[in-house]
Amino acid sequence: MFNNETRNQHFISQVEQKLNCINPSLPRDSRRIYKFKIDDREELTFNLVNPLGVKIENNLSFNDLYTFDVFSDRTRNNFEAYFGKYEVNIEVFTNNILDKIDNNEAITIEEIKDLIFCKMMNFIRNPFSIEKCLNTFGLLSTVSPTDAHALREFQKIKKENIHVSPDVLAQLNISEDKYIQWLKIIFNFFSVKMPKGYLGEEIIDAILDIDKKRIYVGIHTYDQEICLLSDRSFVDYGPALPNDFFCFAFNLNKNSFLSFMIFENTLENIKLFCPEMAPIIDDRNLTIDVMSLLPPRIELLVSKNNVEALRGYNTQVVYQCHTHFFSASTTFLLNN
């Protein structure tokens, strides 16, 4: 399942770029998206790369980014097949949830989890976020698969077998050693089979376990306003939150984005998340049943045309992108 002929390997799929392109009705090889290069992130200044947009076919990709073996017939071993089985569902998952919102239908927890997994896939495989991926999932690079076939392939991930250009590693500002660690994380996350699915699926399911956590999922949709797409694929709201709060946001399509926040159910977190409750909790000076005060669960919050939320999201896309961000339009909202 590792072997294929794909040399140009996308880290944000063409499917997701299509959801943000200028004219999605065009044939696949003619679709374009507006590309902006950051000039000064502190001042939020940037430049349009091409007034006609850039073709998505070779956009947000590098040659042999995930390749760890090349054969005489020019086929190569990489993770394209594993990525592909999730990529084919991204548009379906996205449109299904957005259609349900439009029709005021109930959205299941499993539908939310499926979509979040696909978006987290983009974070893990994003070459501009290798350091963050190592900090989050670094332990996965230190373990080996137990399956004999998987182990044989895993052991090929070493310096003499990688085929990414040294120029790309320089562009990513990453060492060969960290790059190899990252490939090992990707291998274990996406291709190691476990009793209930692949290892990565079980990890994300554990992260979204509601037995001890409070999870808020926000889906923000807009009739006309444009949601930007980052070359990092995500926005991290974590730096503005307490240490043990986790909050990411992802583009869904040109008119919508998704955010999710996770925190442990503790009294201190309740006080941080609901500051108005802090005096009440402090004054009572007795043991409080956290689970009854703020029971663990996933809560879905849907907003329509919330301009302030969009300004905040778009501004963070521009501020946090590595070098470029993308859009279906040259006009979009930012914080002034």
Image: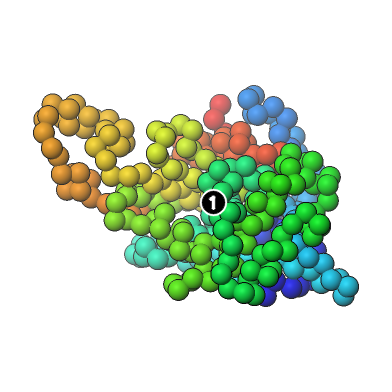
- Residue 175 location (% of width, % of height): 74, 42
Q: Is residue 260 above or below residue 280?
A: below
Residue nearer the viewer, 316 or 207:
207
- Residue 320 visible in this rendered orientation of the protein: yes
Quadrant of the drawing holding the N terminus: bottom right
Rendered residue at 28%/44% (across/down)? 265
Q: Which amino acid, mark 1? A: Leu
Q: Position of residue 320 (x, y in %)?
A: 61, 36
Query: Is 93 left or right of 230, judged from the image as shown?
Result: left
The coloring applied to the image is rainbow
Q: Say which element carries label 1.
A: helix
Question: Badge 1 is on which residue?
Answer: 139
Q: Find residue 231 and report its horizontal and vertical position in percent.
A: 66, 46
Residue 26 visible in the picture: no
Picture quarter with the C terminus: top right
Residue at 60% over, 54% down: 141
